[in-house]
Structures are given as structure tokens and as C-alpha cells.
Image (spheres, helix red, strand yellow):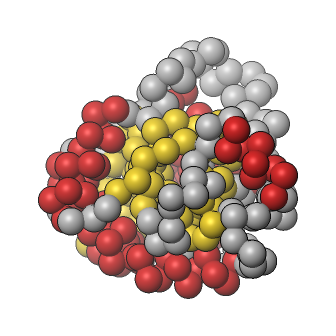
Amino acid sequence: MNNSADYINQKIAPLGIKPDIGIILGSGLGQLANEIDGIKIPYAEIPGFKTSTIQGHAGNLIVGTLNSKSIIAMQGRLHYYEGHTFQEIVYPVRVMKLLGVKTLIVTNAAGGINKSFTPGDLMIIEDHINLTGNNPLIGPNIDSLGVRFPDMSEAYSKNFIDIAEQSAKKLGINLRKGVYIAVTGPSYETPAEIRMFRSLGAEAVGMSTVPEVIAARHAGMDILGISCITNMACGILDQPLCHEEVIQVTKKVEKDFVALVKEVVKAI
């Protein structure tokens, strides 16, 4: 991790900034990176970083300023279903911590389980359910980052949730709130699984985010989570699911998404 952090620090030294807000941009949501005034560093150039293989994940680290705040943004993430370990998935989050990041905004594309949702909705994550069967903290604890048994009673900052709601109201965006449930993928869920998830209290389902949030909380970061509801989960509508639909819907909602994140960053 130190090699990665040292390399990034060398690249951003001419900017004269030290990022304190990290952003992870999920499937099709990378457009926000174009709003950041700074430099782009491909993951492939950074020692220790892996590259994403999924459409909608450009695989760049963007470091610069957004609304006068120092930002480091991941334009695309790694997924368990690509064959990466949880430790590889959360590696960039831990590097962000070494770079000085205290706040993490994590975003994703998700399937709507709550029947009142519609594709294109933005949902603030109030809490999550980890159904991946894994945890990035398994193995020897990294004492320099956090304690062996980190508290997850407020994985998503209530203060940041309030800020996001106020920002959405100011912008006239209809913001949803709910519980995100994480599965491994890459197959979409069955109708029976979606019925089970609903009974567990989940409003949206996806294949990312939870590992990064666990690692970020372990490292003492405050977190805001935003899901873009790109489709209704399996069994709610009488139609098959496909990744192309996910990308199409994120393109339609990216204006509101970018505006919301920029307003939140301004208010933090």
C-alpha cells in the first residue's frame, strides 16, 4: 500500500493538494470524474492496483478539486465476480486512507426491490446486508488502519444522509432511502431470491459496495452511499435483465447524479 500511496503522491505533488474526500464511481456513473479539475492516473500505472474488466468502469484514478474540495475519485471499481479477492477490491480504499482521505462517497448501480421504486431513482443507502459470504477483514488485522472488531452500527453517516437529503431538496431531486443488500453475482438474482431479500428488509440489490464500506469503516472513514436504481429486480417486472439496460439508465440519470454529488461535496 505504501508503494501505491507514494506513487500517487508523486503524481499529484504538482497540484499542491491533499485529497480528503474519496469517491467510488459505480457502473456507468463515471461521468462525474469529468467535473474534477485535476489529473487522471490509469489504474494500470499504479503499483499494486488491479484493473476492472467490466463495461462502464473506465479504470482511472482522478485527483483534483471539485467545488473547491480536494477529491480523489475511482472511475470504476473491482468486483468479486471478476475473480478478485476482497482484499484486492478494498486495496484502493486503504490507499486512500494512507493519502489522508477521511470521507468516502460510494456509489453503485442497483436493482430495485422496493416496488415503489422506478428505474432512474437515486437511493441513499441507510444500511446494508452482506450476503456475499465474505468479509475484507478476514485474516490478520492491519492494526495501523483499525481495530480487530470494528463497529458497524452506523456504517453510513447519519449526518451525511441528512446533508444528501437537504442537497436533493435544494436541487428538486426526488431522493429515495433504503437498505442495500450485496450478493456476489455475476448472475442476476432469481425471483425467489428477490422475495427473500424483500422479507429481510432490503430495498435494493447489487454486486459491490459492501466490501469497500466495511474496509472504510475499519479505517475510520465517514461514509455516504448512493445507489442508482437502474432496473427493477428479477420477478418484479415480466422481462429479463441485462447489463446494457444498467448502462442506459445511468446515462439518463447522470445529470441528477452529478448535480447531487457536487452539492453534497460542497456541503461537507
**Residue plotted at (39% across, 72% down):** 33
Position of residue 225 relative to residue 64, above or below, is: above
**Residue plotted at (21% across, 65% down):** 172
Tell me the quarter of the picture where residue 235 sits. bottom right
Position of residue 186 relative to residue 222, above or below, is: below
Q: Picture coordinates of residue 199 (x, y %)? A: 70, 38
Q: Picture coordinates of residue 13 (x, y %)? A: 31, 58
Residue 148 visible to the viewer: yes
Position of residue 61 relative to residue 145, above or below, is: below
Q: Nearer the viewer, residue 251 or 149?
A: 251
Residue 6 visible to the viewer: no
Q: Nearer the viewer, residue 157 or 87?
A: 157
**Residue plotted at (33% across, 77% down):** 255
Q: Nearer the viewer, residue 230 or 159?
A: 230
Q: Nearer the viewer, residue 147 or 191?
A: 191
- Quadrant of the drawing holding the N terminus: top right
Q: Picture coordinates of residue 248 (x, y %)? A: 56, 84
Tell me the quarter of the picture where residue 130 sits. top right
Q: Picture coordinates of residue 65 (x, y %)? A: 24, 63
- Quadrant of the drawing holding the C terminus: top left
Q: How many marks?
A: 0
**Residue plotted at (57% across, 53% down):** 114
Q: Is residue 103 left or right of residue 41?
A: left
Q: Is residue 230 left or right of residue 21?
A: right
